[in-house]
């Protein structure tokens, strides 16, 4: 009997998804040859709910190592709605279980971030054989030191900060660069350090605008007429940090603010007199070819997942711990996230370089 392995990519895309699909597939075909069939489920869990899938040909996994995005398509299907029956009257969990059975799957591999892992855990608890693979540019999956996609995004955001440096210097301006990351500041912290940002603001450390402006003015006094401020999209100031989530959202909505970035820029200009501009690279940070680091990581994670399939070891997600690829039980990591902890070494590094952290 052929082993039937389902595979899907869910949540926001990122570079390295295709490299991981390829890693899994090539390692499975290498191990099991004709005894394995890979079923591609399209557009994440939505495809599993709708029964949108096809048997993949081995050649479909060739030539995709360097290709950005995902050949399977992806979609955000929020975990909190998985148990909610909507207007379409579809019981999503029942539909996923039914389609898993109809596809005659032996197991299902779910490539995704925190939301994907919560649903993966739900499906495992419903009795399906699930293996997760940790993807996200935010690097915030609990229990793994790194996720694929993160280092490519660091490279892209660093290039943005590099390029902003020259124009900031020419015009003696403050440049506020908004980096992706709603809850976790890893991407801003790493690219901020790699790009030599003067001020780095992350969601884990609420800032005060006074501290930010003091850092700009200190640099000005030292003869440095420009400053680069790397801001995670999810940052809030100390006053907002004391508010409840809903209260904060209402305040932002009333002010017409998407993020704090524009406000920070305006306040810097008002309080220091330094002409200020905003740069939002946005989804560019998730686009294009994966870096060499991410290609290697994706291939390591993919081959490890193939080994888990071969050993029928399910209910786990692949992880990197202290330089070794391993796995964590889904139930231990689902619903948790990995934020930048107080006192983390990278924060110390930033402070040692004289970087203002807000
Ligand atoms: O989770 C990755 C991420 O890029 C976050 O950094 C960002 O907040 C979010 O996705 C953006 O989501 P969307 O692609 O749905 O706009």
Image (cartoon, rainbow, N blue to C red):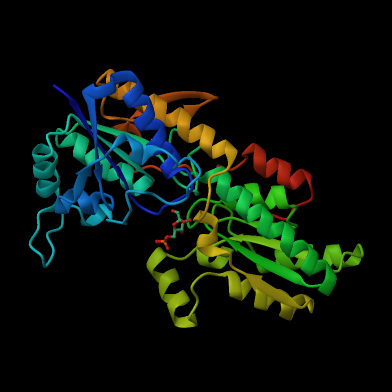
Is residue 183 something one can see in this rendering?
yes
**In which quadrant of this rendering is ligand 1 seen?**
bottom left
Residue at image position (32%, 23%) is 308
Q: Residue furthest front?
A: 59
Question: Can the viewer see residue 327?
Answer: no
Above or below residue 101? Residue 53 is below
User: What number of labels is visible?
Assistant: 0
Q: Is residue 131 left or right of residue 144?
A: left
On the picture, is 49 further left or further right than 268?
left
* Quadrant location, the C terminus: bottom right
Q: Is residue 205 left or right of residue 56?
A: right
Looking at the image, residue 315 sits to the left or right of residue 228; the answer is: left
Using the rendered view, name the quadrant where residue 119 is placed: top left
Q: Position of residue 166 (x, y in %)?
A: 80, 64
Is 307 above or below relative to 66?
Answer: above
Residue 332 horizontal/vertical position (percent): 33, 32
Residue 51 spot, x, y in % from top left: 15, 50
Residue 168 on image: x %, y %? 78, 68
Q: Nearer the viewer, residue 308 or 63?
A: 63
Please name the residue shown 45% across and 82% down the image: 254
Q: Quadrant of residue 178?
A: bottom right
């Amino acid at each position: 009997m052929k082993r039937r392995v389902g595979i899907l990519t869910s949540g926001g895309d990122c570079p390295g998804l295709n490299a991981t699909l390829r890693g899994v597939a090539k390692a499975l075909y290498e191990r099991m040859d004709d005894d394995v069939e890979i079923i591609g489920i399209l557009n994440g869990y939505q495809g599993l709910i709708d029964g949108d899938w096809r048997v993949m040909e081995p050649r479909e996994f060739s030539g995709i190592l360097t290709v950005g995005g995902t050949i399977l398509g992806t979609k955000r299907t929020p975990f909190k709605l998985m148990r909610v029956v909507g207007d379409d009257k579809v019981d999503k969990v029942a539909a996923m279980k039914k389609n898993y059975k109809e596809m005659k799957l032996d197991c299902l591999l779910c490539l995704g971030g925190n939301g994907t892992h919560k649903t993966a855990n739900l499906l495992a608890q419903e009795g399906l054989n699930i293996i997760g693979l940790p993807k996200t540019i935010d690097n915030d999956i609990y229990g793994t030191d790194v996720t694929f996609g993160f280092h490519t995004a660091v490279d892209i955001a660093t290039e943005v900060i590099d390029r902003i440096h020259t124009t900031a210097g020419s015009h003696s301006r403050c440049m506020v660069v908004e980096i992706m990351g709603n809850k976790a500041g890893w991407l801003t912290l790493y690219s901020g350090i790699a790009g030599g940002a003067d001020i780095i603001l992350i969601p884990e450390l609420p800032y005060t605008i006074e501290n930010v402006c003091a850092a700009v003015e200190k640099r000005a006094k030292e003869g440095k007429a420009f400053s680069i401020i790397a801001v995670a999209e999810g940052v809030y100031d100390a006053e907002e940090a004391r508010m409840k989530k809903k209260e904060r959202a209402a305040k932002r909505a009333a002010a017409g603010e998407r993020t704090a970035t524009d406000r920070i820029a305006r306040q810097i200009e008002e309080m220091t007199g330094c002409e200020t501009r905003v740069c939002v690279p946005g989804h560019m940070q998730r686009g294009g070819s994966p870096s060499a680091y991410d290609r290697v990581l994706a291939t390591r994670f993919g081959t490890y997942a193939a080994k888990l399939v071969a050993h029928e070891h399910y209910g786990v997600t692949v992880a990197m711990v202290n330089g070794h690829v391993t796995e964590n039980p889904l139930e231990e990591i689902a619903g948790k996230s990995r934020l930048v902890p107080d006192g983390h070494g990278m924060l110390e590094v930033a402070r040692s370089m004289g970087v203002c952290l807000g």
